[in-house]
Image: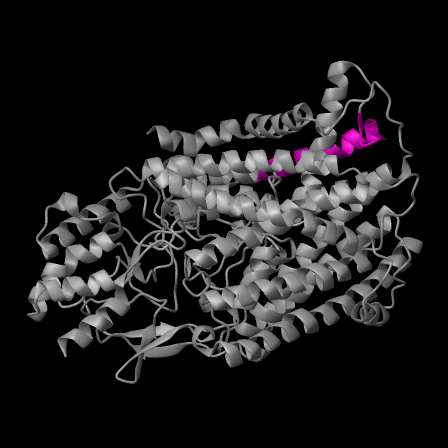
Amino acid sequence: MAGWLALGQFLAVALFLALVHRPLGDYMAHAYTSQKDLAAERGVYRALGVAPRSGQPWQSYLRSVLVFSALGVLALYLLQRLQPLLPASLGLPAVPEGLSFNTAVSFVTNTNWQSYSPEATMGYAVQATGLAVQNFLSAAVGLCVAIALVRGFAGRGAVTIGNFWVDLTRSLTRILLPGAAVGAVILLLGGVIQNFTGFTEVSTLAGGTQSIPGGPVATQEAIKLLGTNGGGFFNANSAHPFENPNAFTNLVSVLLMLILPFSLPRTFGTMIGDRRQGYAILAAMAGIFMLSVAAMTAFELAAADGTAGAMEGKETRFGVAGSTLFGSTSTLTSTGAVNSMHDSFGALGGMMAMLNMMLGEIAPGGVGSGLYGMLVLAVVAAFISGLLVGRTPEYLGKKIGPREIKLACLYVLAMPALVLAGTSLSFALPGIRAEIEETSMLNTGPHGFSEVLYAFTSAANNNGSAFAGLTANTPWLNTALGLAMLLGRFLPIIFVLALAGTLAAQGKVPVTAGTLPTHRPQSVLMLSGVTVLVTSLTFFPVLALGPLAEGLI
Amino acid sequence: MTTLRSTARQLAVAAKALAVFTLLLGIGYPALATAAAQAALPHRANGSPVTVDGAAAGSALLGQSFTDGAGAALPEWFQSRPGTYDGAASGGSNLGPSSPELAAQIEERRQAVAALESVPAEDVPADALTASASGLDPHISPEYAYLQVPRVAEARGLPEPDVRALVDDAVAGRTAGILGEPTVNVLELNIALLELDT
């Protein structure tokens, strides 16, 4: 019974995405290739002083991304430090230095890891003009980088890969802002709050008192999900009834997280002029997504046969299947929002959340980052396939030479290196280990280890969800996780844009009888296989120390 | 040198972009949406407040505690899931599946609920044994609501069928038949109970 209901819910999601991804994907392709600017966009370009028809070489595009993001970190840091001077801040004090740094990095890198409890830390000014703005901007940067890589594949001996400021503006004016506005209206209709009234004290029915929070939640919630950001307005994130009041808003939340990442393969196919290639990418994403949701749901439903029905850390209105669909979606899209506490999932259900992130956030991944991650893996898969049959490796008419494969490998290696180094250092350095064990870990044994492993996995993949029992607001974790988020976001972006530049500069290798096709089922299987194998071999040992050990006890 | 000059120029553009988009997305978007929401959907935008005899009594979306100062269940009310229901500090216990602390809490709750409702320990439903993710879960399962009917009826001196009928009315099924789980909103049920009792 529970399994059938979960299947019905999944089919509803699949049907919606099947209907929407084509028109939306084509719309986005048009948004990034159109030669016409909207009046509002022309105003923005004038204010910024950029010439919208001038392209940038990859180095210049990258410099824009890095400068814009660095400035974003600085501005968000200062905003938090100056909180007492800002209006609508609920009388909250300045956010401490370490926490401000961690949070600024977290929101600019599209991670939205939260070392703090928002109700007691962030006033409305910081939330709306700082955190929510970066929800938009970081998602837009992800889109820009993905589109730049697609232009690399589409280019023929091109010097430039687009104009970052134009891509950024169009991501916001044509995709993220309209999308968030529609999402906010639907969430409002579902009961999500939208006000600036602060906390209201009421007398409860049984004679106690309760503090009812307020806030501009619907607007922030919509972009938190649509931009695969994930940072909650409240500490309980999407488990809070004011963020996610019922099963309907829960489904809307899941769809908001998935809609852009699952439509971008179509954008890719349309922009390179071969939609079958987009379908191949989509198929690999959808296959892994489906298997992963099924696995987490099966593990939690099995755990629900135990003594307490697996309901610790879950909301009654969502139940097990509503929690696992949300949890899988959130960890597979790099969102990191939670409507249930992953720390209290069964050992194997919690492992799935980690495994989803360890895949590198590509099924379907974050807004933009999912597409560029999957395309890099497609380059690796095409390289391996080429070697297997003894031909010069090619993908989409581009030669995969030493420079291309080196960049792809660096991309693939960056995240695991950060996760494993961060986790190992946390336990290997004696002073830090003491802090981790005495202050940070809530649970003990393998589960406590999992809390730390989860944190670094989440940070390096820019996911942001947590085994939230972990107290991360410590000098070591604020700093180490902050660095993991920064490097986990921008190292891959550097490699992707360098790859985009190299590919754009190449001509197109003509298709011959000997060209390996990359849109057929066997190449989709090859791509999925490469993705899963790379992950399982890299992370199996560390999973054995955490969730697998716990599951076997 | 060109790189340096170009970076300086980019920095100026970036600063202007950040300012423009902060105005648009950080002030314009939420301000406009709040004005529209307050005009069109004020009840929902303000947290679906509920009133009893004209006085604010909480939100239909947020659960409440029906316990005395020491945390003991008040028998004349339907009980929410375990938790403190602090609206200013949401969150779950985050205790893991292998946590001895969680196992002890579950066992303690099982005994307490079994004693309160005078039922065998194995009949206590899962939601009565566990804390929610938000700490503000407004719902319990229909099973847990029905389990509490005899005790509430007795504590209030009301006929059991009348109280049971309240729960019948309070049970909400799955959305569209497949989404979520059947629920009973405890605050709304208790308000209906109060109306029945007066």
Q: Is residue A549 left or right of residue A257?
A: left
Residue at 40% across, 41% down: A448
Left or right: B77, with A327 as reference point: left
Figure quadrant of residue A229: bottom right
**In this orientation, does residue A430 appear?**
no
Specify the quadrant that holds the N terminus of chain B: bottom right
Give the vertical position of A97 relative to B56 (above or below): above
Relative placement, left or right, of A306 versus A85 is: left
Q: Residue furthest bottom?
A: B54
Q: Give me the residue at 48% from left, 31% from top.
A: A543
Relative vertical location of residue A40 with respect to residue B99 in this rendering, above or below = below
Q: Residue A430 in the image: state x and y as whole percent.
A: 48, 40
Asked if residue B139 lies in the magenta stretch, the reply is: no
The quarter of the rendered structure image containing the C terminus of chain B is bottom left
Verify whether residue A405 appears in magenta: yes
- The quarter of the picture where residue A106 lies is bottom right
| Magenta residue span | A394-422
Q: Is residue B102 above or below residue A44?
A: above
- Tell me where residue B62 appears, x and y as whole percent: 35, 67
Judge by depth and name the residue closer to the eye, A221 or B84. A221
Residue in the foreground of this view, choosing between A73 and A274: A274
Look at 62% across and 70% down and name the residue there: A129
Please tell me whether the stretch drawn in magenta is mainly helix, strand or loop: helix
